[in-house]
Amino acid sequence: QVQLHQWGAGLLKPSETLSLTCAVNGASFSGYYWSWIRQSPGKGLEWLGEINHGGYTKYNPSLKSRVIISLDTTKNQFSLKLSSVTAADTAVYFCARAEVGMIDSWGLGTLVTVSS
Amino acid sequence: DIVLTQSPGTLSLSPGERATLSCRASQSVTTSYLAWYQQRPGQAPRLLIYGASSRATGIPDRFSGSGSGTDFTLTINKLEPEDFAVYYCQLYGPSFPRWTFGQGTKVEIK
């Protein structure tokens, strides 16, 4: 049973960089897309991007210039960085494991609030 | 981009009743790429159905999915108290965007 444990700063000021990490227990990275998804009242569920076991990334085009997802296989972790945050980036951020056609495991979510 | 439209926005039902939720895609989609999720307050979404009609591991058989092309349905037979939640349909895209979500249907206690 895969478990995803996520953490990171929950309160940011505008223009700062959001940084979240997700630790993977009970699964290898191979064969899956390791993803970040956020949820806000205004925009619902929004896919931010993903990384595979080889470090190949895909990002939501609407965020592509601000988002970086990385992988540390030695620690069984993957991470999200979102730069130049604004109030519009206030949301609950989830890490997740995905494969073709489904997202079968989710972290508990981290509320990130952007406020001056 | 393909848009997923869910209806109704809110469904008010009593325990024991049947819930029928709709998800319509703006163009025909690959059936194997359509999934449904349940989200309870304060929790992450939980995979219910993948491939439009296959139940995920551990999901009770009162949940069923159907549909093809542009129209998909999630049916919940004999609602249990724990079934009152928000339900999302989702589409996987081999290219971009990778995941598209509907706006959700809230099933609430009448």
Image: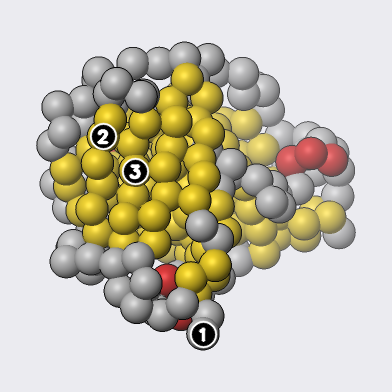
Q: How many marks overall?
A: 3
Task: Out of B31 and A4, give the one closest to the viewer.
Answer: A4
Q: Which residue is mark 2?
A: A71
Q: Residue at 14% of width from left, 27% of height from top? A: A54
Q: Position of residue B99 (x, y in %)?
A: 31, 49
Task: Out of A100 and A24, give the one closest to the viewer.
Answer: A24
Same chain letter for marks 2 and 3: yes
Badge 3 amino acid: Ser
Chain bearing tag 1 is A
Whichever of callouts 3 and 1 sits on the residue coming sooner in the sequence is 3
Q: Position of residue A112 (x, y in %)?
A: 52, 63
Q: Which residue is mark 3?
A: A79
Q: Of helix, strand and loop, which one carries label 3?
A: strand
**Mark 3 Cα within 10 Å, few/some/many (few <14, many 20+)?**
many
Q: Position of residue B50 (x, y in %)?
A: 42, 31
Q: Which residue is mark 1?
A: A116
Q: Of helix, strand and loop, which one carries label 1?
A: loop
Badge 1 amino acid: Ser
Q: Residue at 50% of width from left, 40% of height from top? A: A6
**Mark 1 Cα within 10 Å, few/some/many (few <14, many 20+)?**
few
Q: Are marks 1 and 2 in contact (CB under 8 Å)?
A: no
Badge 2 amino acid: Leu
In space, the residues marked 1 and 2 are separated at their CA atoms by 31 Å
